[in-house]
Amino acid sequence: MLFDLPAIADLSDSALTQRLQAALDHKTKPLGALGRLEALALRIGQILGSERPRLEAPQMLVCAGDHGLAARGVSAYPSDVTWQMVENFLAGGAAVSVLARQHGLALTVVDCGVARAFAPRAARPGQPQLVLKSVAPGTTDASVGPAMTEAQCAQALANGREVVRSLPGNALLLGEMGIGNTSVASLLLARLCGVPLEQGIGAGTGLDAAGLARKRAVLQQALQANAGATTPLQALAALGGFEVATLTGAVLQAAAERRVIVVDGFITSAAVLVASALAPQVLQRCVFAHRSGEPGHTRMLAHLQAEPLLDLGLRLGEGSGAALAWPLLESACALLRDMASFASAGVAQQGS
Amino acid sequence: MLFDLPAIADLSDSALTQRLQAALDHKTKPLGALGRLEALALRIGQILGSERPRLEAPQMLVCAGDHGLAARGVSAYPSDVTWQMVENFLAGGAAVSVLARQHGLALTVVDCGVARAFAPRAARPGQPQLVLKSVAPGTTDASVGPAMTEAQCAQALANGREVVRSLPGNALLLGEMGIGNTSVASLLLARLCGVPLEQGIGAGTGLDAAGLARKRAVLQQALQANAGATTPLQALAALGGFEVATLTGAVLQAAAERRVIVVDGFITSAAVLVASALAPQVLQRCVFAHRSGEPGHTRMLAHLQAEPLLDLGLRLGEGSGAALAWPLLESACALLRDMASFASAGVAQQGS
């Protein structure tokens, strides 16, 4: 596949890591008492290359696309809900819209390949923006052949890189919308991590038992119809979706630019799975926001050796979990920057 | 004990609950897809008696006190660190100071009985305030007799009520500072919940194995020396601390006023334990912010049938966990107030 993989440096810097750890250890608190906030502060410091990291102009990037598989009844909702929800994101009524406003996250929604076309609209400062990067009006049904051609997949990857290049700031929050895309995540989990479908699928937006059985059968067909797609990029093209491929490109670009990447749930984790299979250093830049209620996500997180910040039974997507976790990243940075040390505050240390 | 228990109404209101649940169910998301955020929104709506709840003028109340037990070596830090950390809270350098600034929480620190006296200082708008409500310069060593007299305990309870009455807003976040106070929480857990000391104590601010063995032995002595203190108020006086008793009064007052009460970790949960033993409806007003790394907290949460929002291995106290969880409460309210319904957004519902 003709895809230009950006150079992604190894961030391991033991001198900086030691300085960050020393700074945390001298803060006015017992050693390690801020628990996982300390590891989070350390990670953000490493990504941004600073002992006093500051998150700037955070961008919530919501990628949307439709899926040929949806016609096979793998979702509780009709495909057109993808289009309807994008309009809802832009109108400000969706969960991610509300949370982005709450936390001052600039919201960009990308049409990566939604079945119904959007009218172009003028960007208004401070309002959500729609970026038109549709590769095609939905993928092909993966249960009968590849969801995308290699050229389409390469185009979506390049689109993701280009969109991120156009956005300011040093933090990227990942979101998505696409009726049927938990199926895509389950397929990529099965193919790239070897997790059996039975362990990697769930009810998505609300399938009943019969719907779940149908989903399993359809996904089994998709794996068989694309048995030869075994490399990460082949699997992405054959089993993925336009929004997942665009997100994969976005993750690679953000990693190359040393942005902090805040991963939402099952579908955005699937994009990180593909990106990290291409360039493992991607994971050094990732903060996993939450553990989804979708069972495959726990298997995927285990594969990525990721421990998410929140575990609230969310299964909405959109970037809602990433937005909910965002203040914890801000807190980690503020604590690292602004807490006093024992010496500066005149507080006695342990055992003194 | 002469203590004026405020009237705390039962908030169960099935009509409001049904309206809140219906509002959540009609938001543009699959049923239940916001997971525990939905239960949180429902609870806050119930407490504030509104389908469009809005949190106003949130108050972080940090109660500080010293403990006679500390002289027995139950903590890794000397008692004077209580005083030093209060100065650090007020100077803005502690974790709770940083987090309160981040989230716009007004910070009030109460000297409930710190060993070293504080100079009174003028309140400055927008700055942390110190409230002087010291019952005595530290409790008596509970391993040889009651930590407080009944009159002292009643005074601390009344102080907590009075402080809350003086604060604006409809949400109270609980914090504390007191070298030795994980011992107090473990003692109350043992006495009021019947949890054996071995299961209810931990390293606190950082005891080693020998220190932990010493702590266990000292706490065993305290339970024996106060074997007759079996009611909640008797146990609070005999085994508690001035900050825990003041917090207990604060919780009762906040509950009576239908404020949202955000519970921090092990020590503030101990205050809620006592308050809810006196008036079970207190728990209807509580949101448990996090699960502490201190093992006794998990036992206490189980007794209170509470499921905290965060589980980040925090063991700092101060109210730091309550402050970290605060944006989730704001999010729950914003989602309930501001998300579109399927009808208003023109989005197709499940199965349609």
Image (spheres, coloured by chain):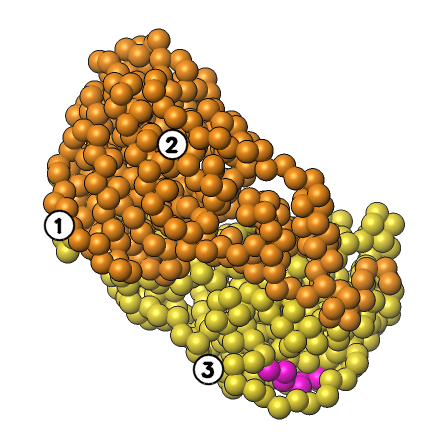
Chain colours: A orange, B yellow
Task: Look at the image and give the residue range highlighted in magenta.
Answer: B129-134
Q: Chain of mark 2?
A: A
Q: Chain of mark 1?
A: B
* Residue B267 appears in view: yes
Callout 2: few (<14), some (14-19), or many (20+) C-alpha neighbours within 10 Å?
Answer: many
- Give the amino acid at mark 2: Thr
Callout 3: few (<14), some (14-19), or many (20+) C-alpha neighbours within 10 Å?
Answer: few
Question: Helix, strand or loop at disc 1?
Answer: loop
Residue B193 locus on image (x, y percent): 64, 57
Q: Nearer the viewer, mark 3 or mark 1?
A: 1
Q: Nearer the viewer, mark 1 or mark 2?
A: 2
> Where does label 2 land, which residue?
A248
Residue B153, quarter of the rendered image = bottom right
Residue beneath the point at 64% across and 64% down = A339
Q: Which numbered marker is on residue B168? A: 3
Q: Are marks 1 and 2 in contact (CB under 8 Å)?
A: no
Q: Nearer the viewer, mark 3 or mark 2?
A: 2
- The correct choice, above or below, for B176 with respect to A162 in the image is below
Left or right of B183, for residue A164: left
> Where does label 1 land, which residue?
B346
